Image: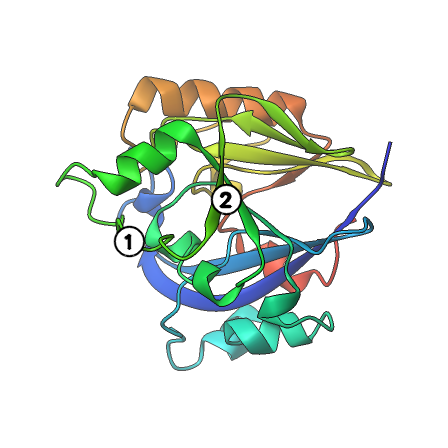
Amino acid sequence: MQNYVIHPLVVGINETDQGVMTYLRDYGKRIYLPIYVFYLSGGDKNILVDTGLEQFVVPDGAEEECGFKILEFEDALATVDLKPEDIDIIIHTHLHNDHCENDYKCTGAQVYVQKRELGFMQNPHPVDHRYYPDVLDDNKIIEIDGDATIFDGIDVIFSPGHSVGGQSVAVNTAGGKAIITGFCCNHKNFPTTGPAIAPGVHIDLTEAYDSIQKIKQMADILIPLHDLSIGRMKSIP
């Protein structure tokens, strides 16, 4: 099976509350929430997982406090010798706007997304304001229905709950199966004992709870989608 290396690229950062990550826990604790693009190297395609926000958001002092550089999308790609037009494949964990706003810059890319997620984005419920229905209008979309193999060594795992059609991305690496979660979380969602904690923001709590337990059990290397520690890693593993 093909091995890949995962390169986390930080393309923005927000300040928020830990309770946004962990259901019914740690409200009132301010945290940084990094916005990632993940580049998967090792195959014959240039593959990204998510593309981040188009607006470049970096609070004053964030880089110094967090211990990593935060770059605009094009500059982040340049650190791995890529330009947006070089991207062949984008795999989306979900379609909240902080995960997909730079897709349009990747003019040659095929975009892989769950069918349920795409349908909800195109006709979102008013309770979830983070969907922009036209954000993928200029892209070639490949709809997925459930678990699927994208390439040898790269699979998606249907992980609904945070959103209606989230998918986690399982990547075969030299260190085992690394999984980029298909839902927003950080290390606090994965205590050393007991079950994982459901995301604090969800469209369906029971699905969110079940999805996070499943992904925790499946992963050799767990990559929480918004964890600060990931930004300090040049590559995984």
Q: Amino acid at mark 1?
A: Asp
The 10 Å Cα crowd at callout 1, few under 14, some 14 to 19, many 20 or more, is: few
Disc sitting over residue 225 in the figure = none
Q: In this figure, what is the number of numbered marks?
A: 2
- Mark 1 lies on a secondary structure that is loop
| Corner quadrant of residue 74 | bottom right
The relative height of residue 4 versus residue 60 in the rendered view (above or below) is above
Q: Is residue 98 left or right of residue 134?
A: right
Q: Position of residue 157 (x, y in %)?
A: 57, 26
Observer able to see residue 195: no
Disc sitting over residue 134 in the figure = 1
| Residue at 83 percent of width and 39 percent of height | 175
Name the foreground residue: 10 vs 45.
45
| Corner quadrant of residue 209 | top left
Q: Is residue 201 left or right of residue 64?
A: left
| Residue at 70 percent of width and 56 percent of height | 46
Name the foreground residue: 61 vs 127.
127
The relative height of residue 200 versus residue 211 in the rendered view (above or below) is below
Give the mark toward the camera: 1 or 2.
1
The relative height of residue 22 versus residue 54 in the rendered view (above or below) is above
Q: Position of residue 97 (x, y in %)?
A: 34, 54
Q: Position of residue 33 (x, y in %)?
A: 42, 58
Mark 1–mark 2 Cα distance, whole angstroms, equals: 16 Å
Quick one: label 1 or label 2, which is nearer the N terminus? 2
Q: Which residue is mark 2?
A: 92
